[in-house]
Amino acid sequence: MTFRPRLLLATMVAAGALFAGSAGAQTGIAQIPIPGAPLTAFDVTYVDEATQRLYLADRSNKAIDIIDAKTDKYIGRVGGYVGLRFKNGKPSNEISGPNGVIAFGDEAWTTDGDSTIKVIDLKAMKIVDTIKTGGEARADEGDYDPKDGVIIYANGDDDTPFVTLISTKPGHKIIGKISYPEATDGIEASFYNPADGMFYTSLPEIKGEARNGAIVVIDPNSAKEVRRFDTRGCHQNGIALGPNQNIFLGCTAHGKEGMEAKFVIMNASGATVAEIPGAGGADIVAYSKTNNQYYAATSNNPTGHALVVVDAGTNKTVPGGIIPILGGAPHSVAVNDVNGHVYLPVSAKEGGCGCVLVFGGPL
C-alpha cells in the first residue's frame, strides 16, 4: 500500500511542479522554494522553536537561509561563507561550508569550511564574530547548553578530530578542546541532555573498526569527557534524544561492511533498547515531542532515498514509514515542535525540487 503522509502546503505550487513519481514515491509534496543558485549542496537544518524560525546551511548560495516555520515561507539569508569547495577536482565536504547551525535569542552560531565558527546577529542579519577553532578542515555539527551558555562544535575532518567548547557570553571564550585520535571516521552530531547537563557526541568509528563506534559524554563546564559507551554494527552519524532518556541513532549501516540496514535506539545509560531493521544509510536524525516520532534523512538507504519515521512509543517504523524521496542528498531533517511540521531539504540533483519539503505530523 502506498503511504501518503498528511502534507502541509508550504507555498502555492503549480501543478506541474508537483512530484508525480512512480507508485510508492511521494505525491502532492509541499515545497518551500530556495531562491538564488540551485540548491545542490547543503548541510544542517535547525529550528529555533522560541521564534519558530528554520535555518538551513546552504552551501550552494554560501549562506544561511532563514524560513518562517509558522507560515513555512522563505524570509531571507545571511551570506559570508566559503560555499561548496573542491579538492582534486571533486566536491569536498571536508572544506565546504556552511555546515552546522544553532540559533537562540538574537544569535545564530554557525560553522564554516575554513574551520571557523561564525556568529550571526539575527536583528542586523550579518556576521558579527568569527571564532577560529585552530583546525585545518571544516567545523561541523554541534549543540547548545542553555543552562551554562556553552556551545559544542566538532572538527571531524581534521587529521586528529576534535571538539571545541565555547562560551556564548560576551568575549566568546574557548573553554576547552578535546582531541579524539581514535575517531577514525571523524566526529558527528551532538546533543545536550538537560537531565544530566551533559553533551552527548557521536564517534561513528573507533580505531578503524567500522562496526565499532561510541557515544562520548562531555561536561560543558570542565570541557572533559566524563564517560562513554560503545555502539555496535551501526556506524552512527546523527543522534537524537527522545523520551525516557532514549537515544535514536542514525545508522549509516546499509548492507556494506557486514552491517545490515537498520536503526538503533539506546538508553543514555548505554543499554540497547531496540534495533529497527528495514532501512538505513542515514545521516541527520530528529525527534519530535509533539508527534512522539523520530525522523531519519537517508540518502544511502538500500532501496533509495527516503524519510524514515519511527514511533518513539513502540520503537518501530510506523506503517508506511519509509517514504521514498525523489531527488538528491536528503540527509538533513528538522522538526518545529510547536506545530509538528517536519522539514526535509532536497537537492536539485537527480530530479529533486531544490527546496525544503514540508510534512505535517504525526506521519
Image: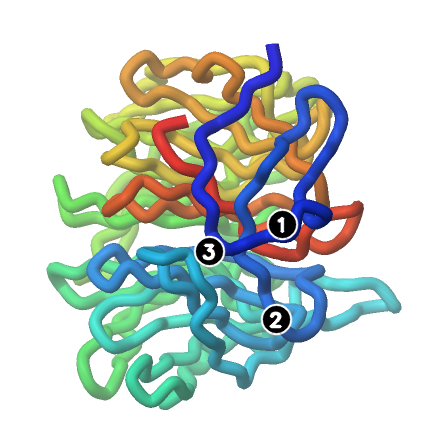
The x, y position of residue 180, in whole percent, is 47, 53
Residues tagged 2 and 1 counted as in contact (Cβ below 8 A) = no
Q: Residue at x 34, y 24 (%)?
A: 266
Q: Secondary structure at mark 2?
A: loop
Nearer the observer, disc 1 or disc 3?
1
* Residue 48 in view (yes/no): yes
Pointer 2: what residue? 35
* Relative side of 17 to 71, left or right: right
Q: Earlier in the sequence, mark 2 or mark 1?
A: 2
Separation of residues labelled 1 and 3 (CA atoms): 11 Å
The disc placed on residue 346 is 1
The x, y position of residue 50, in whole percent, is 20, 60
The disc placed on residue 45 is 3
Q: Residue at x 44, y 35 (%)?
A: 214
Pointer 1 local density, CA inside 10 Å: few below 14, some 14–19, many at least 20? many
Pointer 2 local density, CA inside 10 Å: few below 14, some 14–19, many at least 20? some
Nearer the observer, disc 3 or disc 2?
2
The answer to which image quadrant residue 105 occupies is bottom left
Q: Secondary structure at mark 1?
A: strand
Which is nearer the eye, 76 or 6?
A: 6
The x, y position of residue 319, in whole percent, is 47, 12
Task: Look at the picture and state if 317 lies above or below 280.
Answer: above
Of the residues shown, which amino acid type is indicated by label 3?
Thr
If the image is split into quadrants, where does the N terminus sit?
top right
Of the residues shown, which amino acid type is indicated by label 2?
Pro
Q: Earlier in the sequence, mark 1 or mark 3?
A: 3
Of the residues shown, which amino acid type is indicated by label 1?
Val
